[in-house]
Amino acid sequence: MVTAPAITVSGLSKHFSGKAAVNAIDLTIHHGEIYGFLGPNGSGKTTFIRMLCGLLTPDGGSGSCLGHDLVREARQIKRKVGYMTQRFSLWDDLTVRENLDFVGRLYGVRQRRDAVTNTLRSYGLADRAEHLAATLSGGWKQRLALAACLLHRPQLLLLDEPTAGVDPTARREFWEELHRLSTEGVTVLVSTHYMDEAERCHRLAYLADGHLIVHGSADDIIQTAGVTTWVIQGATAVHRAAFAQTPGVTELASFGNALHVTGRDAGCLATHVPSQARALGLDARLAEPSLEDAFVYLMRRHAQRPPT
């Protein structure tokens, strides 16, 4: 039996003051998929996510989410969605337990007390149940926010840059939890600026100026970009200036004491980059291009296109 997608949209658009924040996006997302959205600030990620969960009404296109029409059945969608905003949006002057209980009331959760107790235990919050939310660290606030999103057992989880300002250990634990939820059939949409988080997603979409630039798996996107990367060990700022003038080079990025040199003309790079490195007394080696290499190239290419 073929299962309908969790989300499918066609030509979805949203304008503010006559400017397109989201411009005619077509996209399909499957049940249990972790789908990442990347793009610079103002690219349309948050607007797109808010339309998908019924918080914003599209002014163009059509779509369905969890079997409901995005425009006509927004209220039904909201009941099935957990939405975690970029900033902590629960109540600082309530305890952890009180926050969860209030969210349970909003969603009409049955056997609310038991649900809150089980959620506190499941997310390691039981020992902090009577702490005011304002006293929690960033990582614990994030855990509380996720627990609140999941209290009513949503089928779709929408996360808007959920790990901003959170330490690496908390970020890793958070993503392990997302993958556990995915195996249970929960569909996850997450916007992020972190490339390591993007690589944890099953598929990705890159937005710029409201346009969908590319989508697919991390490997698909790297292949679409078609970039080649060379790594120069021991390169300094002086060396960087020299490689910036090397034929075929379109992007330079420093990583510690190494310089990543990237371009699309693999033959040109192979001819000029190693010889330039030898002339400077440096070592150059061909490397697998990273997702970051691909996205930076795609961003530059989009920025150089004439406005539409």
Image (cartoon, grey):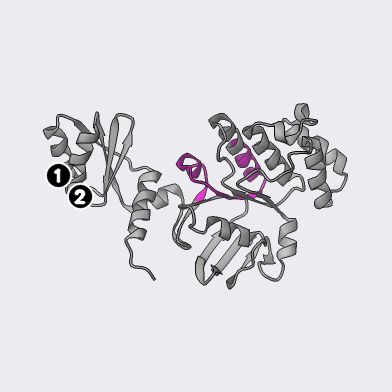
Q: Is residue 261 visible in this depiction of the protein?
A: yes
Q: Position of residue 135 (x, y in %)?
A: 71, 31
**Magenta segment:** 176-203
Q: Which residue is mark 2?
A: 248
Q: Is residue 2 visible in this depiction of the protein?
A: no
Q: Which residue is mark 1?
A: 271
Tell me, yes or no, whether the highlighted magenta stretch contains residue 305.
no
Residue depicted at x 24% and y 32%: 236
The three-letter code of the residue at mark 2 reads: Gly
Q: Report which quarter residue 78 is drawn in.
A: bottom right
Q: Quadrant of the N terminus?
A: bottom right
Is disc 1 placed on a helix, strand or loop? helix
Is disc 2 placed on a helix, strand or loop? loop
Q: Which mark is residue 251?
A: none
Q: Position of residue 75 (x, y in %)?
A: 74, 63
The three-letter code of the residue at mark 1 reads: Thr
